[in-house]
Image: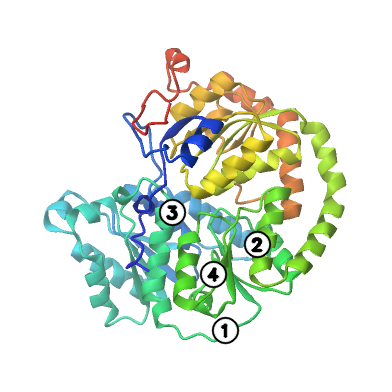
Amino acid sequence: MAETYSGVRESKSGRVNDYGGSSKAAEESFRKGCLKRADRSFAQGLQCQQINSMAALMSLEDAVFIAHSPQGCIGCTSLAVDMYRVGQAHRGVKHIKNPHIIVTNLDQKSVIFGGEKKLRDSVQKAIERYNPKMIFVFASCASGVIGDDIDAICADLQKSADAVIVPIHCEGFKSKICASGFDAAFISIQKYILSKVQAEKKDNLVNLFAPVSISYADQKEMERMLGLLDIETNYIPFYSSLEKIKKIPSAAASTSICKVFADEFMNSLEKEYGIPYSHTVMPIGLRNTDKWFRGIAQVMGKEKEADEIINREHERITPLVQKIRERLQGKRVFICGGTGRSFAAAALIDDFGMELVGLETPTYDDDAQVDIEYLNGIHKDFVVDIANMQPFEQVNLIKKLKPDVFIGVPEWAAKLGLPTTHVLDMKRPTMGYDGLIYLGNKIADQLENPGFNKKLAAHVRLPYKDSWYEEDAFKYIVGGGANV
């Protein structure tokens, strides 16, 4: 896999991660090839690809996760740890545990003399303390700058270890597209685990790739839907194991809950093992759930059965959707989320008769273009902000657009007093036909009960001057030709 794809998403043409402007202008410019890669002369923060590599694997059983980094690099793992603990509770685990995380604590001396000894000591401690089946070693900006050869170190340690030792090259400076971290993890799984596997094919087995941000309720809903097609699901890598990872080559097909999570890996599996895959959308809302379900059904040759199931599901939930629509009709929405989730949520709100006024998402590529073309057909011209984080742009746009509700990562919008709903909800259902009903009611409840956020706004001051809200939100985006 590494020979054909580097794991850096910018290495493939047509991916843009800095843009601000209208949705119709973005669609037209991308179609003409005029939407060029830009940059920001000021950036408030980026999501690092290292945390995505770690979060993608951190719930694996019998594994130890070693961050070859300074201590601060694993600060963001607190969210993944929380989700791991909550997921255990939802799955009926009585004795809840934390993932086994070790940080090598690179410091100034390490930068000068190298961090090899710290990494070797950490691997030995992982084996002595936990006797794991897998040890994942995650590179960092610091280890990359030092030049520690984690591949050679892991290969040397592997000679005397029973555990599979897997180095992962997720140095944060390699990519501004945080989804590259997923690719780095899968590239290493392909190289160090699957390359040694001889697996027998199973005609009804499907690999279902899911990131840490999927709730147990969503997992059960996806497995329920695939079960209606008599499909056995290999749900990976979240709450997975070495044995389940080794089953990947046995599958008849692959699909993913998140369109950007495992797309490159599924493409590699098709080339390496002849496993076809369905690359469609995240199953949030009626339209996207139908499309996701039909996508995997087509790969498995079960389109007729899928259509019958979809008709039954629509008949069941349409009256419930109509009740929610009566509560949400005409409400104006701003959406912020990952590339797959934000576009899925933007399609979802049409089920409830809501109007999209703004969309923030990390990247724009061929897949995003398909979504934008669809959204431009059902919504008026709306603002698109292609940004990995950058909350200063988000609060500026919210102040100007004045939406009724915010859907997505809620912290900044909540501090503005806006009703918010977190579509990136790892604890509650958001996906499939049942998730649609829960999410719709949740949005309506937030709109009807905005008291907490209003009180929050009265007591919290954002770190921006009033003059910033009068500025062009995209004034710091430079280059790119078509960008505002």
**Secondary-structure class at tag 4:** loop
Query: Does residue 148 sit above or below 204 in this rendering?
Result: above
Precedes in sequence: disc 4 or disc 3: 3
Q: Is residue 105 left or right of residue 324?
A: left
Distance between mark 4 and mark 1 Cα atoms: 19 Å
Distance between mark 2 and mark 4 Cα atoms: 24 Å
Q: Residues within 10 Å of mark 2 (few under 14, many from 20)?
A: many
Q: Which mark is residue 295?
A: 2
**Secondary-structure class at tag 1:** loop
Q: Is residue 47 left or right of residue 346?
A: left
Distance between mark 1 and mark 3 Cα atoms: 30 Å
Query: x, y percentage for residue 59?
Result: 50, 63
Precedes in sequence: disc 1 or disc 3: 3
Q: Is residue 386 left or right of residue 253?
A: left
Query: x, y percentage for residue 399?
Result: 55, 20
Precedes in sequence: disc 2 or disc 4: 4
Precedes in sequence: disc 1 or disc 2: 1
Q: Which mark is residue 240?
A: 4
